């Protein structure tokens, strides 16, 4: 009987993909935990299941994380510039 809950493409040397994901996202939360876990899942199984499409999906999730980090950095830069402008106005 085929194991639909724990298929072979989610196992490596006795380790389950979900256990590796749990460890990898331990200090993450929300969207970054989800995107990281999803990228790992697609990288884990690409050779046995989805091939190139799974690699593209992993890239998409990693790019999403990068985009979110860059957005936060941009917002921080804007806030810093606004603070500097306010200080300059007071001089």
Image (tube, rainbow, N blue to C red):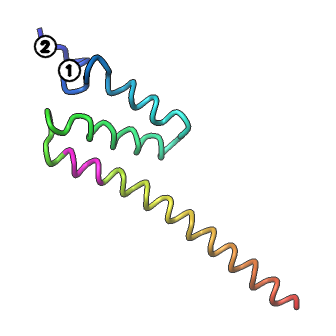
Residue denoted by label 1: 7
- Measured as percent of width and height from the top left, residue 13 is found at 26, 20
Most common SS among magenta residues? helix
- Measured as percent of width and height from the top left, residue 17 is found at 32, 27
Q: Which mark is residue 73?
A: none
- Circles 2 and 1, Cβ within 8 Å, touching? The answer is yes
What range of the chain is rendered magenta?
54-59
* The N terminus: image quadrant: top left
Magenta span has 17?
Answer: no
Q: Residue at x 48, y 36 (%)?
A: 25
| In-image side of 60 versus 80 (left or right) | left
Q: Quadrant of residue 7?
A: top left
Q: Residue at x 33, y 43 (%)?
A: 39
Q: CA distance from mark 2 to mark 1?
A: 8 Å
Q: Which mark is residue 2?
A: 2
Q: Secondary structure at mark 2?
A: loop
């Amino acid at each position: 009987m085929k194991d639909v809950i724990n298929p072979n493409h989610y196992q490596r040397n006795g380790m389950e993909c979900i256990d590796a994901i749990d460890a990898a996202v331990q200090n993450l939360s929300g969207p970054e935990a989800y995107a990281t876990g999803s990228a790992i899942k697609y990288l884990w199984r690409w050779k046995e299941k989805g091939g190139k499409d799974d690699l593209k999906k992993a890239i998409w999730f990693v790019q999403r994380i990068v985009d979110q980090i860059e957005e936060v950095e941009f917002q921080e830069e804007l806030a810093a510039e606004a603070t500097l402008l306010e200080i300059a106005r007071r001089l």
